[in-house]
Image (cartoon, rainbow, N blue to C red):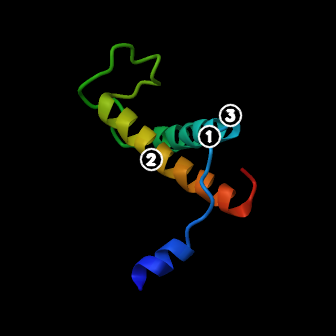
Amino acid sequence: MFTSTLLAAATAPLEWSPYVGLTMIIANIIAIAFGKSTIKYPNAEPKLPSPNFFGGFGAPALLATTAFGHILGVGAILGLHNLGRL
């Protein structure tokens, strides 16, 4: 019974488009800006090869902000697809 309920809630598949990519890029920029202002030690070890290129972030901060950005991006993309905007 649970499987039939789950299948009934499924939506049409989402195909990739430049708008999907742009939405993910914007979500990552927002997450990096949020992380830049809230992470207590953004330059923690290990350092990245060119810190100025990465905004002064260390590897942990960069991974954390981009992971958060992907979570935001997936939510935004699925939400916009569900609304019929993507």
Residue at image position (67%, 56%) is: 81
Residue type at mark 1: give it: Trp
Q: Where residue 53 is drawn, which disc sits there? A: none
Decide: few, some or many residues near mark 1? Use Cα within 10 Å; few <14, some 14-19, many ≥20: few
Q: Nearer the viewer, mark 3 or mark 2?
A: 3
**The quarter of the displayed image where residue 18 is located:** top right
Using the rendered view, name the quadrant where residue 12 is placed. bottom right
Judged by depth in the image, the label closer to the viewer, 3 or 1, is 1
Q: Residue at x 56, y 73 (%)?
A: 9
Q: Quadrant of residue 59?
A: top left
Q: CA distance from mark 2 to mark 1?
A: 21 Å
Q: Which residue is mark 2?
A: 68
In the visual, does 20 lie left or right of 36? Answer: right
Residue 8 left/right relative to 60: right
Q: What residue lies at 45% left-to-right and 23% top-to-bottom?
A: 54
SS label for mark 3: helix
Quadrant where the image shows the N terminus: bottom left
- The residue labelled by disc 1 is 16
Q: Nearer the viewer, residue 74 or 4?
A: 4
Residue drawn at (71%, 50%), measured in percent from left and top? 86
Q: Residue 38's spot in the image, x, y percent?
A: 45, 46
Instruction: Check disc 2 and give the amino acid type.
Output: Phe
- Secondary element under disc 1, as helix, strand or loop, is loop
Pointer 3: what residue?
Answer: 18
Cα distance between the residues tagged 3 and 2: 21 Å
Mark 2 in CB contact with mark 1 (< 8 angstroms): no
